[in-house]
Image: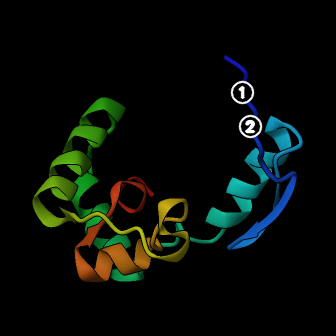
């Protein structure tokens, strides 16, 4: 059956982007997420305390996973660019919730 797909080459969704190729699209996502991974100092201190003395990377991941699982909640947020852009790590740390993108950020 005949099919026509239409998509913009250049767009502005949070920041300027381009779908010309995967590199351009990846750069848009990188710019959209830039600077959102900064944790507040109190959270950095908590994490340092949790992993102090642990050298095994698998054990560090396990400790951090359980900490995040016990202290944050999932909520679906799709406002504005919310479908593509996560909330900043600071926001998640302070409010103890975020969507899948925010929690992995």
Q: Name the residue under label 2.
A: 5
Q: How crowded is mark 2: few (under 14 residues within 10 Å), some or many (20 or more)?
A: few
Q: As displayed, is residue 41 above or below residue 65?
A: below
Residue nearest the viewer, comparing 43 with 45: 43
Tell me the number on the disc at residue 41: none
Image coords of residue 10 (percent x, y): 87, 58
Image coords of residue 26 (percent x, y): 74, 46
* Residues marked 2 and 1 touching at CB (< 8 Å): yes
> Which residue is depicted at the point 27% across and 52% down?
51
> Which residue is depicted at the point 24% across and 35% down?
59
Left or right of residue 97: residue 25 = right
Looking at the image, the residue that sits furthest to the front is: 1
Q: Mark 1 points at which residue?
A: 3
Can you say which quadrant of the picture contains the N terminus? Answer: top right
Left or right of residue 2: residue 9 = right
Left or right of residue 50: residue 84 = right
Q: How crowded is mark 1: few (under 14 residues within 10 Å), some or many (20 or more)?
A: few
Q: In which quarter of the image is residue 28?
A: bottom right
Looking at the image, the residue that sits furthest to the top is: 1
Count of all numbered marks drawn on residues in the image: 2
Residue nearest the viewer, comparing 4 with 28: 4
> Which residue is depicted at the point 44% across and 75% down?
79
> Which residue is depicted at the point 87% across and 51% down?
9
Instruction: Estimate the spatial distance between the alpha carbons at disc 2 and disc 1, rounded to whole Å.
Output: 7 Å
Q: As displayed, is residue 73 above or below residue 79?
A: above
Helix or strand or loop: what does disc 1 sit on? loop
Helix or strand or loop: what does disc 2 sit on? loop
Can you say which quadrant of the picture contains the C terminus? Answer: bottom left
Image coords of residue 93 (percent x, y): 31, 75
Looking at the image, the residue that sits furthest to the left is: 70
Image coords of residue 60 (percent x, y): 29, 42
Q: In which quarter of the image is residue 33?
A: bottom right
């Amino acid at each position: 059956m005949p099919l026509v797909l239409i998509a913009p080459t250049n767009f502005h969704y949070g920041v300027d982007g381009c779908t010309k190729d995967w590199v351009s699209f990846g750069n848009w996502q990188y710019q959209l997420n830039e600077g959102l991974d900064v944790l507040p100092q109190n959270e950095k201190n908590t994490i340092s305390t949790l992993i102090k003395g642990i050298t095994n990377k698998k054990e560090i991941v396990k400790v951090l996973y359980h900490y995040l699982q016990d202290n944050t909640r999932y909520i679906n947020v799709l406002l504005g660019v919310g479908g593509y852009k996560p909330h900043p790590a600071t926001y998640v740390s302070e409010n103890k919730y975020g969507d899948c993108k925010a929690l992995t950020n």
